[in-house]
């Protein structure tokens, strides 16, 4: 399915704020009112009625943004972060856990060394028994046709190309699993700026009775689904380019925003969303859930959300690329119960949540330090350089009884730490797969892209068994 060709958007670009952001080495990308040079955040301080400078203060509703003190009352009446009446599909903690946290999570340097060693042994044993050589790497596929035009843009950075490769692969997974059917609601869980759903709309919802539903708890600027606001413009829509970054943020309430008759965005925390009450889901015959890099405990909330009692019968399948396992919570994590049955108790599980970061944290040095050390090594090949051995950055604490805490004396190489971290992450995702199997899904873990594209390259693919 072809997308509209590139065309100039110069005439439609709104005036841009002329404030130079030193940290980003570019102009601010917010739009300005006609006749103004600066956006509201960077406008020089105006004067109040008595001639004093009008100060900008943090908004009481959300200190992440500011407003003028003299206009605080008006701002509070229209602020997007103000308390508002919740729609009926918002039910607090409906997808969370009612379990209380009986074992507080501690950093690894507060945990005895022998406990950490015991958990590492359990991780290796369970991985070798249940997962070794059982997670396939999906074969290479050409870039999906809805992504291809942007992928071939010569101005794309390598980072951008990696994201496009992942989006392309997830689109192929949904199609290859047979999830694309008429009158389907394609739900992006933790949608962020909605890039994946933008491609999904072009691939599966254009000129059909299917729709895309984007769910995220944050209100973000420059959302890609803004480009799908008007179906009447879809045939002559211009290619997204740098001008997208000049697009103004949405005004008003974003708790339920309709962009076109088959594109919907909900501002909701997945922990509080009763999906069966969402009109777009009610009007659909089938439901498909997908996500790219769904972070930590959000994956558990998402799986509970899309497999809730009122939705489960409609679900065709899910394709969730997970990440950030260190941000899981034992009380809410779907893997805690099956792993507990295999000998991972509450203390062990919290250690597991500390170990998973080893898969992606590198050697503990910042990028600048690594570059400086590499440059020193090239300029002075005769002087031994500090290789920053694994033990240098590991904190060790000894209590009055001689008990050793932390990971310093584990004597693991960087490669061994990464391997253990990856195995721990796989066990958490495997626990989620077991949850889906209990609900009647044919579920598995797959490597959906090579690790050179993303270190977080594991996807949960589950198809509902009829």
Image (cartoon, rainbow, N blue to C red):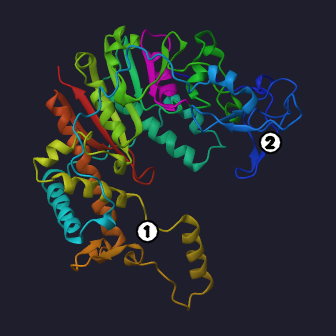
Q: Is mark 1 on a helix, strand or loop?
A: loop
The range drawn in magenta is: 195-219
Q: Residues within 10 Å of mark 2 (few under 14, many from 20)?
A: some
Magenta-colored stretch includes residue 435 = no
Marks 1 and 2, how far apart at CA:
38 Å
Q: Residues within 10 Å of mark 1 (few under 14, many from 20)?
A: some
Which label number is shown at residue 382?
none
Q: What residue is drawn where x is 22% and y is 16%? A: 313
Residue 27, can we see it? yes
Which corner quadrant of the image does residue 244 belong to? Answer: top right
Against 68, residue 396 (above or below) is below
Residue to which mark 1 is pinned: 363
Residue 76 x, y percent position in the rendering: 63, 24
Looking at the image, is 211 positioned above or below residue 48?
Answer: above
Specify the quadrant that holds the C terminus.
top left
Q: Which one is nearer the viewer's eye here, 205 or 305?
A: 305
* Discs 1/2, front: 2
Camera-nearest residue between 419 and 273: 273
Q: Is residue 210 magenta?
A: yes
Is 409 on the left-hand or right-hand side of 392?
left
Nearest the eye: 232 or 323 = 323
Residue 435 falls left or right of residue 219: left
User: Which residue is disc 2 drawn over?
Assistant: 19
Disc on the earlier residue, 1 or 2 = 2
- Of residues 294 and 415, the one nearer the viewer is 294
């Amino acid at each position: 399915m072809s997308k509209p060709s590139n065309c100039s958007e110069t005439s439609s670009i709104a005036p841009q704020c002329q404030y130079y952001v030193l940290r980003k080495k570019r102009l601010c990308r917010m739009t300005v009112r006609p006749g103004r040079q600066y956006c509201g955040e960077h406008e020089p301080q105006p004067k109040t009625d008595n001639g004093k400078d009008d100060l900008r203060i943090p908004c009481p509703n959300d200190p992440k943004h500011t407003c003028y003190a003299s206009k605080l009352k008006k701002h509070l009446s229209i602020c997007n972060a103000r308390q508002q009446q919740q729609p009926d599909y918002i039910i607090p903690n409906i997808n969370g856990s009612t379990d209380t946290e009986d074992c507080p999570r501690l950093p690894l340097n507060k945990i005895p060394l022998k406990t950490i060693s015991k958990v590492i042994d359990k991780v290796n044993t369970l991985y070798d028994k249940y997962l070794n050589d059982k997670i396939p790497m999906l074969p290479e596929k050409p870039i999906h046709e809805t992504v291809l035009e942007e992928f071939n843009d010569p101005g794309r950075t390598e980072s951008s190309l990696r994201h496009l490769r992942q989006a392309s692969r997830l689109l192929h997974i949904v199609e290859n699993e047979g999830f694309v059917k008429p009158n389907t609601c394609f739900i992006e869980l933790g949608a962020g700026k909605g890039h994946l759903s933008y491609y999904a709309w072009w691939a599966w919802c254009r000129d059909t009775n299917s729709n895309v539903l984007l769910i995220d708890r944050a209100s973000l600027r420059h959302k890609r689904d803004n480009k799908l606001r008007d179906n009447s413009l879809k045939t002559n829509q211009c290619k997204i380019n740098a001008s997208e970054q000049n697009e103004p943020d949405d005004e008003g309430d974003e708790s339920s925003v309709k962009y076109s008759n088959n594109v919907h965005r909900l501002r909701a925390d997945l922990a509080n969303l009763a999906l069966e009450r969402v009109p777009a889901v009610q009007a659909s015959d089938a439901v498909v859930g997908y996500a790219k890099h769904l972070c930590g405990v959000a994956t558990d909330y998402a799986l509970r959300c899309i497999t809730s009692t009122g939705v489960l019968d409609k679900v065709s399948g899910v394709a969730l690329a997970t990440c950030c396992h260190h941000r899981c919570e034992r009380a809410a994590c779907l893997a805690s119960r099956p792993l507990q049955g295999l000998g991972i108790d509450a203390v062990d599980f919290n250690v597991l949540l500390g170990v998973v970061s080893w898969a992606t944290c590198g050697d503990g040095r910042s990028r600048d330090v690594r570059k400086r050390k590499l440059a020193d090594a090239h300029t002075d090949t005769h002087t031994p350089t500090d290789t920053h051995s694994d033990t240098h950055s590991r904190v060790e604490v000894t209590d009055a009884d001689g008990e050793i805490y932390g990971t310093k004396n584990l004597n693991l190489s960087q490669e061994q730490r990464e391997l253990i971290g990856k195995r721990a992450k796989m066990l958490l995702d495997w626990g989620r797969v077991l949850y889906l199997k209990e609900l009647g899904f044919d579920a598995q873990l797959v490597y959906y892209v090579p690790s050179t594209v993303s270190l977080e390259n594991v996807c949960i693919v589950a198809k509902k068994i009829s």
